[in-house]
Amino acid sequence: MWKLAVLLLGMIGAPLISAAMPEADARDGELMARIAQGDERAFSTLYDRYSRAVFGTVLRIVRDRAIAEDLLQEVFLTCWRGASRYDLRAESVLPWLLVVGRNRALDRIRSAQHRNEQTAHPLDEVADLAGARESFEETIWKHRTLDQVRRALQALGDDERRVLELAYFEGLSQTEISARTGHPLGTVKSWTRSGLQKLRRALL
Amino acid sequence: MNEHAHFDELYERYLLGALDENEQALVADHLGRACPECLRGLQQARSTLAALSALAPEEAPSPRVRQQLLRAIATPRPSPRLQWVWGISTAALLVLSIGLGVRVHQLETTRSRDIAQRNQLQEELLRTQRHDRELDAAFALINRPETSIVPVAGRPQTPSAHAFVNRNLGVVLIARNLPPVTAQQTFELWLLPAKGKPIPAGLFQSNQRNAGLEFYRGPLTNIQAIAVSVEPSGGSPQPTTTPILVAKLPA
């Protein structure tokens, strides 16, 4: 009798447990809606999808794997806790994760610098653009913005990319970038504006 | 010209931390209106800026991070034996429910209630786990003899706080009567150095009783005061609103 019951459960229950099927193709918005309901499986899928990208950004900023892993946890826990409060479904999840990760990492760097525990990162450690972009694009922007991101980054001139990198990954102000690179402040501002404009147009 | 079109460009530089003081004030004032167009502009600017992350190589974090995260959000589950018993019980219930649509509806209602209860417990557990270690360290700071207690005056008068300040260990801020904030806002603690810009010292939310707690761990070298302001979710590199709490620290 119980075999019949289990069989019936399997048939009747199938639609109920459809959420447990492979979900690698689930869209971000669906995952966030389920995370807001406390769905741990959706959360782990989101983590598997984006943790490498977020970790890459955070590690580039703090240059310490242990600190970067700590920050990565913070970012994803913020996502888990905030899924129901923030309207993350209104925008793509990845930019939100990346920018929050970047802000947290810069906060950590600033606190460390304030305590004189951290030295400034030399500019010549900047990673090779082509290699970095290929890896990132293949797994992250693939489904939607691969071409857009490629176009956007290729559109940047060397000087524009350099000032944007210093601002984004090191959190330097325009004045600090001017001092670091030796270029006049007006020129730095101009490169920043034109670089952002090119990015925006290419991503539209 | 559409007023918001001008701000779209400013938002990118705002998020990048590339505005001068006048522009910063202009954006802060505009964001204070919290209109849907502003939020859309911020989201668009965030997407533009996030593309710069593609300049950093992807890196695989340790599998330990994934395990710890999943453990932090997980609720205790029934043992395999209990799961088996539960499975059989559910099967029996489902068999009995065939032809009884009303009963199925009742089960669905119960299930939804169980899920809601489980989510509530998960949130509680997560909060507890996250705060345990922080609270241990916070209480250690509070109990040190050299720690001083600084009343923190609010502006307007409603919010208030006490800050437990230890120059070597950091500051524990306990705030009350915090103003309501929207889903797109958060409270941010700032360290105000003798010279230079405010230093971000952590984000926090208020609880249902409008109280909030933030713990900044680290020496307070050359810090003259602390402040709390309301900022867009995710925090700001520099304050964008007038602080609601400010306190001068003892030397």
Image (cartoon, coloured by chain):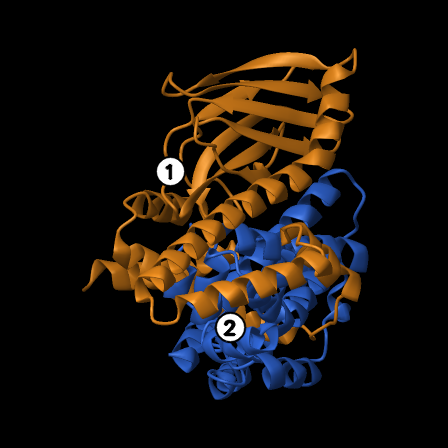
Chain colours: A blue, B orange
Looking at the image, is mark 2 or mark 1 nearer the viewer? 2
Residue A132, placed above or below residue B202:
below
Label 1 resides on the chain identified as: B
Residue A131 x, y percent position in the rendering: 70, 84
Q: Residue at image x 79%, y 48%?
A: A118
In the depicted structure, whether residue A160 falls above or below residue A134: above
Secondary structure category for the residue under label 1: loop
Q: CA distance from mark 2 to mark 1?
A: 38 Å
What amino acid is at disc 1?
A: Val
Quadrant of the image occupied by residue B173: top right
Which quadrant is the N terminus of chain B positioned in? bottom left
Residue for point 60% across, 78% down:
A158
**Rendered location of residue B57, percent (x, y):** 70, 75
Q: Is residue B228 left or right of residue B44?
A: right
Tally of numbered tags: 2
Please rate how many residues cluster around mark 1, counting C-alpha atoms within 10 Å: few if below 14, some from 14 to 19, many from 20.
Answer: some
Residue at the location (59% across, 39% down)? B202
- The tag on residue B181 is 1
Vertical placement of residue B176 versus B19, above or below: above
- Residue type of the residue flagged with mark 2: Ile
Indicate which disc residue A17 carries: 2
Tag 2, which chain? A
Q: Is residue B195 above or below residue B17?
A: above
Q: Position of residue B190 (x, y in %)?
A: 56, 34
